[in-house]
Image: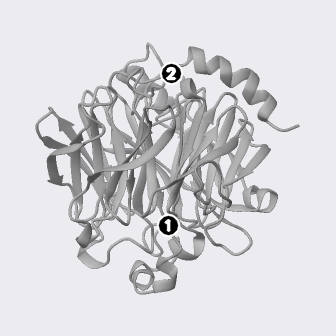
Amino acid sequence: MRLTHFTAAVLLGFAIAAPAVADETCNSPYMANLIKGQEDFLHVWTLGIKGLGDGNDKLVTVDANPKSKRYGKVIHTLSLPGRGEAHHMGFTDDRRYLWAGRLDDNKIFVFDLVQPQRPKLVRTIANLAPDSGFAGPHTFYAMPGRMLVQALSNDKDHGGVTGMVMFNNAGKIIDKYPMPTTALAGGVKGDGYGYDIAINPAKNMLLTSSFTGWNNYMMDLGKLIGDAEAMKRFGATMVAWDLKAMQPQKVFSVPGAPLEIRWSLKEGDNWAITATALTSKLWLVKQDAAGEWQAKEVATIGDPAKIPLPVDISISADGKGLWVNTFMDGMTRYFDLSNPEAPTQTYAKQTGKQANMVSQSWDGKRVYITSSLLANWDKKGADNEQVLRAFDWDGKALTQRFEVDFNQLKLGRAHHMKFSARPAGRDIAASAAAARVAQR
């Protein structure tokens, strides 16, 4: 049975009942147990480096509570066999389990966070490519009792034509959804590429963006830039899907590889924003006066001629601000979204020699930056710093609070981050005692 029956019956109820919110502001609206206060832990998914430590990919847990004696320190590492291009993570709808994927070998690891200070590996999913035909699990998006995974590539030619795969929370594949390759409403032809997922339940809208396939993202960046044909193989579209039917409805032309998508979290806004990596633009997806969904360019990020390479964005809980990281110049920029039709950069700081992921707390007072993009795209030599940096944000400037040097600690390349918190009612001392007992 196709999942559309489940979607129509259950997601319609969520469209009415579930607010489009999340703790670090960029998660699925179906995820429970939101952290609107102080996060306690930061989980960092790291890429192994041959000859550095054990060389394996890892889930690294950092204490993020300023009241803790171990604040800013690594308190747990979980090493996974091999190096498979560790990339993104996502919680299940009950926030109990954290799914983490690898873009090269297509493996998905499921961690139990019942004790968030000591994540436990409980499942390894290895059938994504053979059972769906898609490869490169990228985005993990919580659905009611399900996990929707956006792939970047395929198992046939390792190109960019791909699709989404729906799993249940037990790790079984339920259905798959190819990205469109034909023209839909509006006449724009789909390119078949995929990258991110973002849902607005109130509008029955699922948005997807596009990137590139295994042949490109596993290539050395310098070689890729010098390969004119390879540079043509990047996505240039976003797709609007009917959420309940899980059917593509309209393809938008968005040149330059649109990556992360963020819906405004302010009730009633009903617009989303994305950044294009290759053209360094912000694009707005919104209904026009006639009620038709449109995508349009609304701002420029840095100097596009220098290819700053926007890689991650994080929207504030009130929908009025957007953090944008650009990899090549290591800059973190803040855009005022008070008028989403005309975002304005109001602040910028170089937060590293290379800057990739950016996450913020629900209250917007804390911002975290990691440095690694892809193993073969990271900078070389002294510019290849691998760090997690934590900042306070007072609305005017970022002030660094701590740094974790993953090279120095031999933990690999720091990529994606997720927050977690101690169980309700358990203070720092009690959690520390429980951790000591667990280690015996």
Q: Residue at x 44, y 47 (%)?
A: 295
* First of labels 2, 1 by sequence position: 2
Q: Is residue 226 above or below residue 439?
A: below
Q: For the residue marked with disc 1, what is the amino acid?
A: Asp
Whole-percent x and y of residue 231?
Answer: 47, 78
Q: For the residue marked with disc 2, what is the amino acid?
A: Asn
Residue 139 disc label:
none
Q: Residue at x 46, y 16 (%)?
A: 424
Between residue 406 and residue 201, name the one nearer to us: 201
Mark 2–mark 1 contact, CB under 8 Å?
no
Q: Is residue 332 left or right of residue 96?
A: left
Q: Is residue 280 left or right of residue 199?
A: left
Between residue 256 and residue 324, name the one nearer to us: 256
The residue under label 1 is: 54
Q: Alpha carbon of mark 2 to alpha carbon of mark 1: how far?
A: 35 Å
Q: Is residue 291 left or right of residue 161?
A: left
The residue under label 2 is: 33
Q: Quadrant of the C terminus?
A: top right
Determine the image quadrant of residue 360. top left
Query: SS at mark 2?
Result: loop
Is residue 44 something that shows in the picture? no
Outermost residue, right side: 1
Q: Is residue 150 above or below residue 354?
A: above
Whole-percent x and y of residue 384?
Answer: 30, 71
Is residue 261 something that shows in the picture? yes
Q: Is residue 349 above or below residue 81?
A: above
